[in-house]
Image: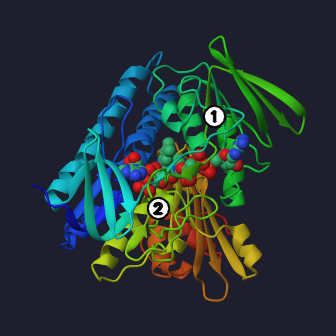
């Protein structure tokens, strides 16, 4: 008979919850992790949005579609002729599903090895550090815990003027599941999802129109990066309409008539599928019983302090259901930090150095402050830029687009932000994150030996360029 008493109960088995459970078990605590995720095929799986409907499936399709695009547009430059390039969306989707299955089953294996008790079903926080667990077959148990970690994640936001119907008007999960390339695809929101999934279906041949409400493109990124990115997305064939306010979406005759207004007035657009990707909201439905003491803020996030403590004693919350960027690695760091804290170990999340990556081509990644943010702060700064066109490795890879940019303080040379648009930007940014984690200076990067020929030399040269000492490009 399984015990109903644990040191730690985690509600949510996504990238915030499952690492929390594993770390708590590594800290010799008894742990249960409850998760209710249900897939389209009716199967239950740990891993949350990230593994089942987010990071992993999107990257699988980004990779497949990028290969198609390169075979069509790049191979010739290498002297490779393939004739007509054909592809099979159903096979791509099958590959994606296999990767997802392997990843989610991997969590169960990790739980088993760490000694975490997996519980598939719904968890509801009760007062007095108790959790009501309802298994998928309807059976109920009450668990008692010394600490409870809420990691219930987020869900897509709906647009009243374009409600989801699961068929023609879909969320990001729906857009990851198309079994054929839509001839005309509309995307509402030019954020991370809109650009990643818009790229996938554009590369596979869809005509893609992206409607973005804001007048500026990618305002959260460094301005120089946003401008460069917009140029490349246009070259790919994404039609990005800025300042577009969607007023309606009508499904008729197997197509969607979208109406919107922009600077030119009332507009319309007809597409075969419409993806609404306007952000995500915290998910806390039926999570909290009366009287738990946990508080929710005006935007629906569970209120926490800098250490992820909620207003209720020994109840913690991590990941997308709390403030901060909705990123898997942010949730993981919070989950692990809380699992260490409850075991009495030192734990801290450095919110200043959370990297962001957009997995398009060229890839976009940054950490720290944009040049605009540094300028607004009034601190004197210097900028070093290095174009990938000047990198031998990037040229050899047929990937000369984009640049590395280092923004550093004039007074003490501290690195304030690093921005990369170009090949493998998401991998390159890790070095900048490490440097900033140790409060590194641009001189630290300058004095670090980088292997030749590598893409990472671009970051090295950008750091040198901040002091006008770059070797492989003009110091402007
Ligand atoms: P979730 O992953 O949402 O997991 C929460 C889990 O808790 C779910 O399984 C849910 O079913 C379960 N749950 C909720 N309430 C209960 C309850 N009461 N009882 C039991 N179970 C419950 N982030 C990145 O960092 N990199 C990327 O490349 C990236 N790509 C993305 C692509 C897409 C298309 C999307 C949609 C998101 C992407 N994200 C990416 C964001 C990332 O998926 C989220 O930030 C991350 O999944 C949040 O983790 P979480 O554990 O907080 O929540
Ligand atoms: P987002 O916040 O990145 O972008 C939403 C976009 O929609 C914004 O540009 C916003 O201005 C626009 N918008 C909002 N309302 C609109 C409206 N009514 N009409 C037109 N445009 C509108 O959100 P997302 O792309 O939906 O992604 C959700 C979350 O998932 C984000 O927090 C993101 O960080 C995360 N995510 C991360 C990755 C990654 O790390 N590579 C990939 C996908 C998703």
Q: Is residue 60 above or below residue 144?
A: above
Q: Tell me how many marks there are.
A: 2
Q: Secondary structure at mark 1?
A: helix
Q: Quadrant of residue 419?
A: bottom right
Looking at the figure, which quarter contains the N terminus?
bottom left
Tell me the colour scheme of the image.
rainbow
Name the side, left or right, on which 223 lies relative to 31: right
Q: Which residue is tagged 2? A: 290
Element under label 2? loop
Q: Is residue 268 above or below residue 411?
A: above
Judge by depth and name the residue closer to the eye, 306 or 303.
303
Q: Residue at x 63, y 59 (%)?
A: 299
Taking 407 as reference, is 82 left or right? left
Instruction: Decide which of 317, 238 is in the foreground and name it.
Output: 317
Image location (x, y in percent) of residue 155:
52, 46
- Which residue, as the protein is rendered here, is positioned at the far front? 290
Residue 224 in the image, given as x and y percentages of width and height: 70, 58
**Quarter that holds the C terminus:** bottom right
Callout 2 crowding tier (Cα within 10 Å): few <14, some 14–19, many ≥20: few
Q: Residue at x 57, y 49 (%)?
A: 280
Circle on res. 236 = 1
Q: Which mark is residue 213?
A: none
């Amino acid at each position: 008979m399984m015990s109903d008493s644990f040191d730690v109960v985690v509600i949510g088995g996504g990238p915030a919850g499952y690492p929390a459970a594993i770390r708590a078990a590594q800290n010799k605590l008894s742990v249960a992790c409850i998760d209710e995720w249900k897939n389209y095929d009716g199967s239950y799986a740990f891993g949350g949005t990230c593994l089942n409907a987010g990071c992993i499936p999107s990257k699988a399709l980004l990779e497949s579609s990028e290969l198609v695009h390169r075979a069509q547009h790049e191979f010739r430059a290498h002297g490779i002729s393939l004739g007509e390039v054909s592809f099979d969306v159903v096979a791509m989707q099958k590959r994606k599903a296999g990767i997802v299955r392997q990843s989610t089953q991997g969590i169960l294996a990790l739980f088993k090895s760490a000694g975490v008790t997996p519980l598939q079903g719904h968890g509801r926080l009760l007062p007095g550090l108790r959790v009501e667990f309802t298994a998928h077959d309807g059976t109920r148990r009450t668990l008692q815990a010394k600490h409870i970690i809420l990691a219930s994640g987020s869900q897509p936001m709906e647009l009243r003027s374009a409600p989801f119907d699961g068929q023609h008007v879909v969320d990001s999960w729906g857009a990851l599941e198309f079994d054929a390339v839509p001839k005309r695809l509309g995307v509402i929101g030019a954020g991370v999802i809109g650009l990643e999934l818009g790229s996938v279906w554009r590369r596979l041949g869809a005509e893609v129109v992206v409607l973005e409400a804001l007048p500026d493109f990618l305002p959260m990124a460094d301005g120089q990066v946003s401008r460069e990115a917009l140029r490349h997305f246009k070259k790919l064939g994404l039609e990005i309409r800025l300042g577009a306010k969607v007023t309606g979406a009508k499904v008729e005759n197997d197509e969607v008539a979208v109406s919107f207004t922009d600077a030119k007035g009332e507009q319309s657009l007809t597409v075969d599928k419409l993806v609404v990707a306007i952000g995500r909201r915290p998910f806390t439905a039926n999570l909290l019983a009366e009287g738990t003491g946990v508080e929710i803020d005006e935007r629906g996030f569970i209120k926490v302090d800098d250490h992820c403590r909620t207003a209720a004693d020994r109840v913690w919350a991590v990941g997308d259901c709390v403030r901060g960027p909705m990123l898997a690695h942010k949730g993981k760091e919070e989950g692990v930090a809380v699992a260490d804290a409850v075991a009495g170990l030192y734990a801290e999340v450095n919110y200043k150095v959370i990297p962001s990556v957009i997995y398009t081509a060229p890839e976009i990644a940054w950490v720290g402050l944009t040049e605009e943010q540094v300028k607004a702060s009034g601190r004197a700064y210097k900028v070093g830029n290095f174009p990938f066109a000047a990198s031998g490795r990037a040229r050899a890879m047929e990937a000369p687009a984009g640049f590395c940019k280092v923004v550093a303080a004039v007074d003490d040379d501290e690195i304030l932000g690093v921005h990369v648009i170009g090949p493998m930007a998401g991998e390159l940014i890790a070095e900048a994150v490490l440097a900033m984690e140790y409060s590194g200076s641009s001189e630290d990067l300058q004095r670090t030996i980088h292997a030749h020929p590598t893409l990472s030399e671009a970051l090295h040269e950008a750091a040198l360029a901040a002091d006008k000492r770059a070797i492989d490009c003009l110091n402007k």
